[in-house]
Image (tube, helix red, strand yellow):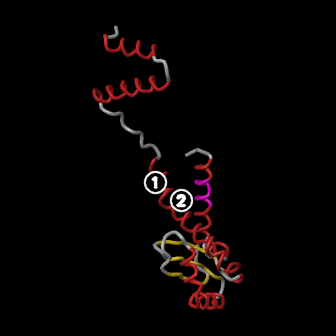
């Protein structure tokens, strides 16, 4: 049998005239339940995947995307075609180029004002320095065939991202 308090609550739900009133009554019942039984535990489930994705993939991707817009607007044509932006962490933009000659030319352009213009054009995290390396970086390593493991890692990462977009994770 139902006690008097529960009967009154059920009757109040039946007599509720608006959705707001029903919502208020639901919150009241929930608060009473939590007071007596304690709040229900949250199901962690795959929350660690969301935190990992946000920290290791989403945030660096957004930061690199923001600096990429400034790079495309300011970089000389040869640099846009040859250089690959690899990462942007802690204010350091890392890029890979295919040869020492391109690295030398890009270094000279950076020293003669390109780096300062990039700093001024980039609204996000402060650009502290630009590192240019010959043939380094994840994409150039796989395109050059240097590391089969990097290619496999990229395939697995793309599968995880695809599954996350489809809501399977």
Residue 67 rendering spot, x and y as whole percentages: 58, 71
Q: Which mark is residue 128?
A: none
Element marked by disc 2? helix
45, 12: nearer the viewer: 12
The magenta stretch spans which residues? 155-161
Closer to the camera in the image, 40 or 69: 69
Q: Residue at x 60, y 63 (%)?
A: 154
The residue under the point 56% across, 83% down is: 115
Residue located farthest toward the front when viewing the structure as drawn = 17
List x then y, in percent, for residue 61: 56, 64
| Residue 96 x/y as whole percent | 60, 79
First reached walking from the N terminus: tag 2 or tag 1: 1
Q: Is residue 15 left or right of residue 104?
A: left
Name above or below for residue 8 compared with residue 39.
above
Magenta-colored segment: predominant secondary structure: helix
Pick out the residue farthest to the top.
1
**What percent of the width, then of the height, locates residue 69?**
63, 70
Q: Which residue is mark 1?
A: 51
Q: Residue at x 62, y 52 (%)?
A: 162
Outermost residue on the left side: it is 36
- SS for dot 1: helix
Q: Is residue 28 visible?
A: yes
Residue placed most toward the observer, 7 or 163: 7
Residue 149 visible in the snapshot: no
Residue highlighted by disc 2: 58
């Amino acid at each position: 049998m139902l006690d008097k308090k529960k009967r009154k609550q059920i009757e109040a739900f039946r007599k509720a005239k608006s959705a707001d009133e029903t919502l208020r009554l639901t919150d009241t019942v929930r608060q009473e339940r939590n007071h007596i039984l304690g709040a229900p535990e949250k199901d962690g489930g795959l929350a660690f995947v969301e935190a990992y994705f946000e920290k290791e993939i989403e945030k660096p991707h957004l930061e690199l995307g923001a600096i990429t817009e400034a790079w495309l607007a300011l970089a000389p044509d040869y640099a846009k075609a040859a250089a690959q932006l690899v990462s942007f962490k802690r204010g350091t933009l890392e890029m890979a180029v295919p040869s020492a000659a391109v690295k030398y030319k890009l270094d000279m352009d950076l020293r003669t004002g390109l780096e300062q213009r990039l700093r001024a054009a980039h609204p996000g995290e402060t650009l502290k320095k630009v590192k240019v390396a010959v043939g380094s970086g994840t994409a150039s390593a796989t395109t050059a065939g240097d590391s089969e493991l990097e290619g496999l890692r990229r395939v697995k990462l793309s599968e995880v991202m695809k599954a996350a977009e489809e809501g399977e994770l």
